[in-house]
Image (spheres, rainbow, N blue to C red):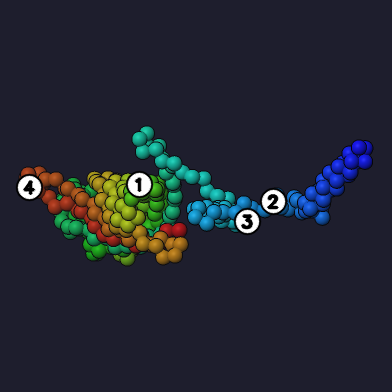
Amino acid sequence: MKTFISSIVLASLATLTATVSAQPTPSDPCEACAAAAQPLPVAANGPALALAPPSVSAPQQPGTVAAPAVLADDESGWHRPAGERFTSGFRLGWMYLANFDAKNRVGDNGQMTSLKEQYGLKSPNMFLLGYEGFYRVIGHSWLNVLMVGNVSVAGLDQSKFIPTASGLLGFEINRSFELGVGVNLIPDAQSPSHMIVAAGWTPRVGSIQTPIHFFYIPDSAGTDAMGGSLKGNSRMGATVGMNW
């Protein structure tokens, strides 16, 4: 009886040993880790997942600083501040004096005389030489504000020195057309101040500006002692120069 039970136990141990020996065991522990890291198979009929490539920003050049974003609030009216720029330069030009020989003023002797006789002018056409300051308030749009000051000398071509000064306020439209109005002063006791209107544009030649302007200075002489109308000495002309 004992021999029969021993035979059954030995047979069971032999069967268990054979079953364990039949199962494969990895030769290297890392193989199990590699097997676990393998990606799962994708079903043939399943949709493929598209992976978006990571966004790569453009490299910033060394020594450059990115400009801050400027936000404009149209409802409250706050925008970036207006720019300012001042330029100046010489002016060359021509001026025409209307009715320069008309007797429309009272001379030192109390008699009616003309500008031609009073100042010894030879021609109504005169050469202009001057200097001008040009202050521009930049609005960062189609409209800029202009403030102009000019000091000139007329009559050098006739051996005369007639100084004149002007100050104007105006506008510049689309960096091309310019229009201004202001006051003109001359050393004349009877008519020292006048209105002046000017228009033109300022082309660019490289870094130099070449303003081209036309001006008109109206004048009304009034009436004489008999009530007759007197001819005024209006002036008109053009200037060209350079600003830097």
Q: Looking at the image, which residue sits at the far front?
A: 1
Which-is-in-front pick, marks 1 and 2? 2
Q: CA distance from mark 4 to mark 2?
A: 113 Å
Residue 145: image tag: 1
Which-is-in-front pick, marks 1 and 3? 3
Q: Looking at the image, which residue sits at the far top?
A: 76
Q: The residue under label 1 is which amino acid type?
A: Val
Identify the mark nearer the N-term, 3 or 2. Answer: 2
Residue beneath label 2, please? 37
Identify the mark nearer the N-term, 1 or 2. Answer: 2
Q: The residue under label 3 is which amino acid type?
A: Pro
* Callout 3 touching callout 4 (CB < 8 Å): no
Give the position of the C terminus as an image quadrant: bottom left
- Disc 1 element: strand
Q: Residues within 10 Å of mark 2 (few under 14, many from 20)?
A: few
Q: CA distance from mark 1 to mark 4?
A: 42 Å
Q: CA distance from mark 1 to mark 3?
A: 38 Å
Residue beneath label 3, please? 62
Q: Nearer the viewer, residue 37 or 159?
A: 37
Q: Position of residue 114 (x, y in %)?
A: 19, 55
Q: Nearer the viewer, residue 176 or 199?
A: 176
Q: Residue at x 49, y 55 (%)?
A: 45
Identify the mark nearer the N-term, 1 or 3. Answer: 3
Identify the mark nearer the N-term, 1 or 4. Answer: 1
Residue beneath label 4, please? 228
- Disc 2 element: helix
Q: CA distance from mark 3 to mark 2?
A: 42 Å
* Callout 1 touching callout 3 (CB < 8 Å): no
Identify the mark nearer the N-term, 3 or 4. Answer: 3
Q: Residue at x 25, y 63 (%)?
A: 125
Q: Residue at x 41, y 41 (%)?
A: 72
Q: CA distance from mark 1 to mark 2?
A: 72 Å
